[in-house]
Image: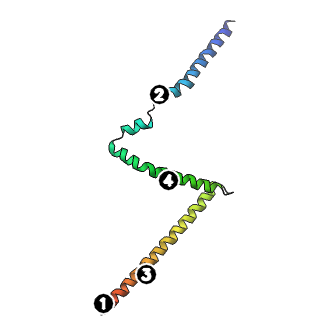
Amino acid sequence: MAGRQSKIGTWLKMLAVGGGVCIGGPAFVFWVQPSDEELFKRYNPELQKKSLNRKFERQKEFDDFVCQLKEFSKSDKPIWIVQEEAARKFKEARLQEDAKKAEEAKARKEAMRKEAGIIGDE
């Protein structure tokens, strides 16, 4: 009989300590952790201004990312494969655009040389 009472006491102690840890731990962290506003107030004014300026830019980037994910999710393929294909297409388009700009710059350079040659001959 004495063994049974000690087992019940041990179980009750274990439940009390476990409950204290499971409930008290997160409650303590919630109580100690500063809010976003408190952290922002601790910034120096220069960092506050920079953070506010970047806030809208980060929000726009996130919104664009979410819109891309929604578009990619419409495909039957996995999202990561669709993302790779989109990145590849974007890279190819950028390379073509750079090549086009280089050709235009070369054409302008040639036109300037011809113009300078014509002016130099007169």
Q: Which residue is mark 3?
A: 107
Proximity of marks 2 and 3: CB atoms separated by less than 8 Å: no
Sooner in the amino-acid sequence: mark 4 or mark 1: 4
The crowd level at tag 2 (other Cα within 10 Å; few <14, some 14-19, many 20+) is few
Which SS class for mark 2?
helix
Question: How far apart are the alpha carbons under marks 3 and 1?
Answer: 19 Å
Q: Which residue is mark 1?
A: 120
Question: How far apart are the alpha carbons under marks 2 and 3?
Answer: 67 Å
Q: Which numbered tag is attached to residue 86?
A: none
> Where residue 102 appears, x then y in whole percent?
45, 75
> Which residue is at the front of the view, 5 or 98?
98
Seen at 67% across and 6% down, the residue is 2
Quadrant of res 41: top left
Question: How far apart are the alpha carbons under marks 2 and 4?
Answer: 32 Å
> Please, what is the three-letter code of the amino acid marked with disc 1?
Gly
Seen at 37% across and 48% down, the residue is 50
Which SS class for mark 3?
helix
Q: Which residue is mark 4?
A: 61
Q: Which numbered tag is attached to residue 31?
A: 2
